[in-house]
Image (spheres, grey):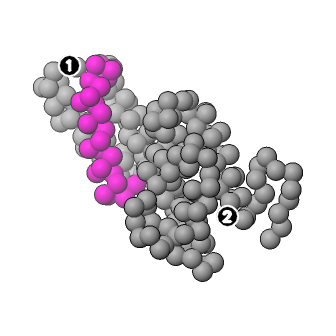
Amino acid sequence: MHDAPAVERLFSDHAAAVLAYALRRADRATAEEVAAEVFVIAWRRADRIPQAEPLLWLYAVARRLLANERRAERRRAALHDVLGLLATRGHQAAPAPGGDAGAGAELREALAALRPADREVLMLTAWEGLDGAQAARVLGCSPQAVHTRLHRARARLAAQLGRTAPADSSEVTTT
């Protein structure tokens, strides 16, 4: 399917089914966004769509997009929780870089104390909302390396915030 009419036929034949698939798994707004993105991907990757059962390919794309959306929502919720914890400790929540200079000083200081590589992987996943594979492409490494770096960076950030001892430290911090 390299031509526009073939992709248009794909859309007219399967758009309702893809939307219904997404609606059974997400709210209407998310489902509509996912369904639209499925066909954007289909347009870009038309040569990869199997001729025999294209709907299955479309469902697989929708499934991955929905999974990505759920992971992004969990990351946003986790970041919100972390920033909320800072706020309850007497600190304002940290804005994205370039935001209010007075807010989130402790978090910004902790991030600044990290190695640049740790800071980058944390910011790509938490503030930019990238998943491991996307961050890996940005960083030029494997998703497994991102997972390892992220785990270590989170431990170091927690240590900077005084929650736990650094992963490579022999000292134990109690709270």
Quarter of image, res 142: top right
Identify whether 60 is placed above or below 159.
above
Is 42 drawn above or below residue 64 in the view shown?
above
Q: Position of residue 59 (x, y in %)?
A: 38, 36
* Nearer mark to the viewer, of 1 and 2: 2
Query: Along the horizontal axis of the image, is 95 left or right of 43?
Result: right
- Horizontal and vertical percent position of residue 104: 52, 70
Quarter of the image for the C terminus: give it.
bottom right
Whether the magenta-drawn stretch holds residue 34 is answered as: yes
Residue at left offset 31%, top offset 57%: 29
Residue that mark 1 sits on: 2
Residue occupying the point 29% across, 42% down = 37
Q: Amino acid at mark 1?
A: His
The secondary structure type at the circle numbered 2 is loop
Q: Is residue 134 left or right of residue 78?
A: left
Residue 7 vs residue 74, the one in the foreground: 74
Which stretch did the figure color magenta? 26-51
Residue 22 disc label: none
Residue at the spot x=77%, y=49% of the render?
Answer: 167
* Image quarter in which the N terminus is found: top left
Q: Position of residue 67 (x, y in %)?
A: 47, 45
The residue carrying mark 2 is 161
* Magenta span dominant secondary structure: helix
Residue 140 among those drawn in magenta: no
